Image (cartoon, rainbow, N blue to C red):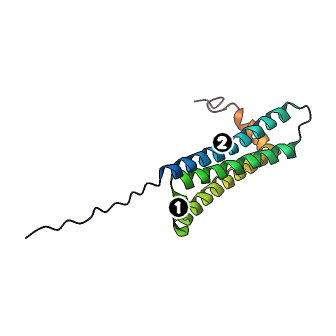
């Protein structure tokens, strides 16, 4: 009985050379431009802090733009280098939605922690209670009891 050979099955598909180079250049340019914008905003924030009267609203806006650009860059990196951009929509949502929930989770805890800190710092009773517990009254145990 003669054995019939079957063609090799492979799942590795390498695109053509010119297409790969164009994709690498495009990815490098996009990530570099986003990074340069982030750096420019960071230097802008630095110099605004040096100003005797910094605009808090402008600084907060610039920080928000940096966060958004960083998330955009992270999603682009995941899409290109992890090849998630070539997958079906349901698989993408399976990965992206829990990630967004995790980011929301961190933000909620930071907000809650800051709220708790501000409440504790502005509450006069907590401050008085802290001062009382930090300097306990001397114990009278054993004094004047005639043991």
Closer-to-camera residue (58/6): 6
Question: In this rendering, would 4 be left or right of 136?
Answer: left
Closer-to-camera residue (112/102): 102
Q: Measuring 60% from the left and 56% from the top, which residue is drawn there?
A: 102
Q: x%, y% of residue 92?
A: 55, 63
Q: x%, y% of residue 145?
A: 63, 32
Q: x%, y% of residue 86?
A: 52, 61
Disc 1/disc 2 C-alpha distance (Å): 22 Å
- Asked if one can make out residue 123 in the rendered structure from this viewpoint, the answer is no
Q: Measuring 53% from the left and 69% from the top, which residue is drawn there?
A: 90
Question: In this rendering, would 45 be left or right of 81?
Answer: right
Above-or-below relation of 99 to 130: below
Above-or-below relation of 6 to 42: below
For label 1, the residue is 86
Above-or-below relation of 72 to 49: below
Q: Name which quarter of the figure residue 144 lies in.
A: top right
For label 2, the residue is 32
Closer-to-camera residue (86/146): 86
Closer-to-camera residue (147/10): 10
Q: Name which quarter of the figure residue 141 lies in.
A: top right
- Give the residue at the far left of this rendering: 1
Q: x%, y% of residue 6?
A: 23, 66
């Amino acid at each position: 009985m003669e054995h019939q050979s079957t063609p090799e099955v492979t799942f590795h598909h390498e695109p053509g050379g010119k297409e790969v180079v164009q994709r690498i250049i495009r990815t490098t340019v996009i990530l570099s431009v986003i990074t340069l914008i982030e750096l420019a905003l960071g230097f802008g924030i630095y110099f605004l802090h040096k100003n005797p009267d910094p605009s808090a609203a402008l600084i907060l806006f610039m920080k928000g733009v940096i966060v958004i650009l960083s998330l955009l860059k992270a999603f682009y990196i995941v899409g290109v280098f992890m090849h998630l951009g070539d997958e079906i929509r349901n698989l993408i949502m399976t990965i992206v939605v829990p990630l967004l929930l995790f980011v929301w989770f961190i933000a909620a805890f930071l907000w809650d922690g800051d709220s708790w800190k501000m409440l504790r710092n502005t509450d006069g009773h907590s401050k008085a209670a802290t001062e009382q517990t930090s300097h306990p009254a001397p114990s009278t145990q054993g004094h004047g009891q005639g043991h």
